[in-house]
């Protein structure tokens, strides 16, 4: 598993105090959804965007646009 994200279940508190949309695709986040806190960029993203990030990240959690980036998620 990636250590770049903290996986959480969306609570009302998070939705009210932090965000109720994904920081990447701006889709709505609802209570009970699985969300991922991005330790590098300090925001929450949805499941789909987390998976997309994982495909582009190296082991240091940097987003690598190069196709040669190491896949580790
Ligand atoms: Zn998203």
Image (cartoon, rainbow, N blue to C red):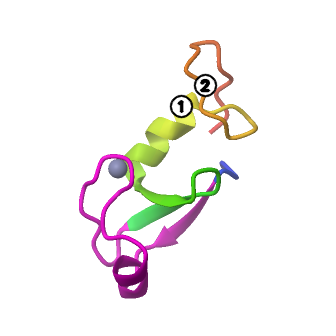
- Which residue is most to the right? 60
Is ligand 1 less than 8 Å from the beta carbon at label 2?
Answer: no
From the top left corner, tell me how far across and down residue 63 is, in percent: 59, 32
Which region is colored magenta?
Answer: 5-33
Specify the quadrant of the image occupied by residue 59.
top right
The residue drawn where x is 59% and y is 15% is: 66
Q: Residues within 10 Å of mark 2 (few under 14, many from 20)?
A: some
Q: Is residue 23 above or below residue 64?
A: below
Identify the mark at residue 31; answer none if there is no mark: none
Q: Residues within 10 Å of mark 1 (few under 14, many from 20)?
A: some
From the top left corner, tell me how far across and down residue 6 is, in percent: 60, 63
Q: CA distance from mark 1 to mark 2?
A: 9 Å
Check if residue 1 falls in the magenta segment: no
**Horizontal side of residue 40 vs 50, given as left or right:** right
The residue drawn where x is 61% and y is 25% is: 64
Residue nearest the observer in this picture, 41 or 8: 41
Which is more N-terminal, label 2 or label 1?
A: 1
- Which residue is most to the left? 28
Q: Is residue 28 above or below residue 49?
A: below
From the top left corner, tell me how far across and down residue 29 is, in percent: 29, 66
Secondary structure at numbered mark 1: helix
**Horizontal side of residue 5 vs 36, given as left or right:** right
The residue drawn where x is 41% and y is 45% is: 49
Foreground: disc 1 or disc 2: 2
Residue nearest the observer in this picture, 22 or 1: 22
Residue named by callout 2: 64
Secondary structure at numbered mark 2: loop
Discs 1, 2 touching: Cβ within 8 Å: no
**Horizontal side of residue 12 vs 6, given as left or right:** left
Residue named by callout 1: 55
Check if residue 11 falls in the magenta segment: yes
């Amino acid at each position: 598993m990636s250590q770049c994200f903290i996986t959480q279940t969306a609570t009302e508190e998070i939705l009210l105090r932090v965000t109720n949309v994904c920081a990447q695709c701006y889709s709505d986040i609802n209570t009970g959804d699985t969300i991922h806190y991005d330790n590098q960029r300090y925001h929450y993203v949805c499941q789909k965007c987390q998976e997309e990030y994982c495909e582009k990240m190296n082991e240091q959690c940097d987003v690598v646009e190069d196709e040669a980036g190491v896949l580790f998620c």
